[in-house]
Image (tube, coloured by chain):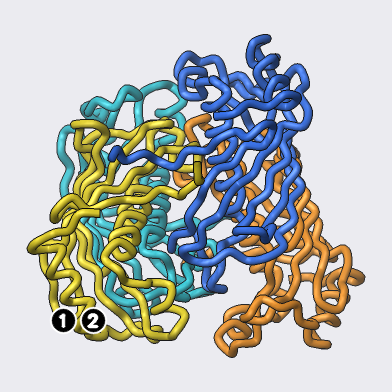
Chain colours: A yellow, B cyan, C blue, D orange
Amino acid sequence: MILTPPTGRFDGTLHSFPVRVYFEDTDLSGIVYHANYLRYFERARSDMLARVGIDQRGAHDEGFGAYAVTAMDIRWKRPAKLDDELVVESRVTKVRAASCSIQQRVRRADAILAEAQVTAALLTPEGRPRRQPADWVEKFKAVAEEGMNT
Amino acid sequence: MILTPPTGRFDGTLHSFPVRVYFEDTDLSGIVYHANYLRYFERARSDMLARVGIDQRGAHDEGFGAYAVTAMDIRWKRPAKLDDELVVESRVTKVRAASCSIQQRVRRADAILAEAQVTAALLTPEGRPRRQPADWVEKFKAVAEEGMNT
Amino acid sequence: MILTPPTGRFDGTLHSFPVRVYFEDTDLSGIVYHANYLRYFERARSDMLARVGIDQRGAHDEGFGAYAVTAMDIRWKRPAKLDDELVVESRVTKVRAASCSIQQRVRRADAILAEAQVTAALLTPEGRPRRQPADWVEKFKAVAEEGMNT
Amino acid sequence: MILTPPTGRFDGTLHSFPVRVYFEDTDLSGIVYHANYLRYFERARSDMLARVGIDQRGAHDEGFGAYAVTAMDIRWKRPAKLDDELVVESRVTKVRAASCSIQQRVRRADAILAEAQVTAALLTPEGRPRRQPADWVEKFKAVAEEGMNT
């Protein structure tokens, strides 16, 4: 048995990614601190990039740039607690020249805990918007429209 | 000279709260990690409660409950960097029986870095919505309509 | 295929737990922010408790108490970077009435990135030290001396 | 009245820096999560550098390098809670060619909550140790031996 970090998968156009809640995620209300859902969403998007075949770290190391979140509309509906096993579900809903829209939600079994509509834009290391490479756009369109199975 | 933690103030209906950017706030893009703006917004709302005369910790310790963010629409416009001196500006825009709406933004000098529309609801320790005490509602209405100077 | 959050395992007295590095973990130096290793160590200890059969959340929910770190000696040796697959290795080295000592380290393949000697003490919800239940002490002694395979 | 972010000061060889505890800092035990003390220590060290006249951001932006923590021995003694006003006290205890030792502690009024012995080393952007500039060494030696008043 090989130890592997958490890994998500595509099932058609739906990407799913598992998260467990640790002490670091909670606050004194006894539930996950609201800002930490954004960390969960980002882990899922990073995994989605990896599944689609885009090398975030390579792009950063070569000075090409990185994705930045430019807009997010979130609703928190139910609390998550220590030790909960959550799934972050993500769908690419729109692919533009320099950005993508992604619908994301966090669920625990059948309960939806949080939902977000996210816009992520590709930025140069200097912070200016840049067009996504043509093959990245194609990859995103492929998972947005036909999906994949991993 | 007495050392004091950062403290905000009201100038009419506008509450301002200072934040400095540290290493902990940045990510490998060299700028503040997007989720950390939610921590800045929350610090400013906590300070606003203190200025208005609401004791969050007392409410928690007595088992009365705490505010939870239930909705947030955010736009990130410009990056913040290490050592930047930021100001979080907040305005209560609507006071309901069990929740408030707050408009918040982060600026560095005259540049707006991020804007958010936030809904915060009062919850019991079990996570159920509860009506805000009448004097809290009055305090919020007072700062929303007439403001205060501190 | 079922999605599961990261899960560690015991191989004798050595517990191993996988971690992947995300944007949230890095700082503007391009590497994992030093304090975040403590989050990795804590995730591994939480997993170790679960493997040993101790229910942290249950203990908290029943008002029994929780483990708190009271001492840590850490050495950071090599940096971790975005997307790195790390393993946190942990060994219980001493079991006392109210606390345990755990040796932990973070490695990437054969390179040791960080090492820590940790003391975790059981505290009541009011923050006072309390004796560990006899069956917990036995479980810790068992993994410290004979180990287990999971 | 001008809004200023929290700022520390030297009183002889002792540097003091104020911190307030927010929701983000706490965990479900109702107290400050242990790893967050490392963030408080780092804020205080950053402020100390600024007071001494060393420009961390400039050094990073010019590709010169940055300080990294290479060793820390910490003891957590008493919990900190929401809204607590804390002071981080720091003293430079040893200045070497490529690193410094700093003694730090967090206190609330007269109670010591945590103590740490920290080693911070100057690293190039590639992560290799580098000698501290001669004028930085002098500045550290000056605050370590004679102190300053700010």
Task: Tell me if D120 is positioned left or right of B144 in this view.
Answer: right
Q: Which residue lies furthest to the right in this view?
A: D145
Residue tagged 1: A97
Q: How many marks?
A: 2
In percent of width and height, residue A58 lies at: 42, 77
Residues at marks 1 and 2 touching, judged by CB atoms closer than 8 Å: yes
Task: Tell me if B128 is positioned left or right of A82 in this view.
Answer: left
What is the chain identity of the residue bearing mark 2? A
Q: In which quarter of the image is the C terminus of chain B?
A: bottom left
Q: Residue furthest front?
A: A1
What is the chain identity of the residue bearing mark 1? A
Task: Tell me if A106 is positioned left or right of C5 in this view.
Answer: left
Residue B145 visible to an observer of this rendering: no
Q: Looking at the picture, does residue B77 appear above or below residue B14?
A: below
Q: Which residue lies furthest to the top in this view?
A: C134
Residue tagged 2: A132
Q: What element carries label 1?
A: loop
In percent of width and height, residue A142 lies at: 13, 68
Q: Which of marks 1 and 2 is nearer the N terminus?
A: 1
- Going by the numbered disc 1, the residue's amino acid type is Ala
Q: Which residue is drawn at 21% across and 61% down?
A: A118
Near mark 2 (Cα within 10 A), the count class, few <14, some 14-19 or many ≥20, is some
Q: Residue at x 50, y 68 (%)?
A: B21
- Going by the numbered disc 2, the residue's amino acid type is Gln
Same subunit: marks 1 and 2: yes
Q: Which residue is drawn at 34% across and 67% down?
A: B106
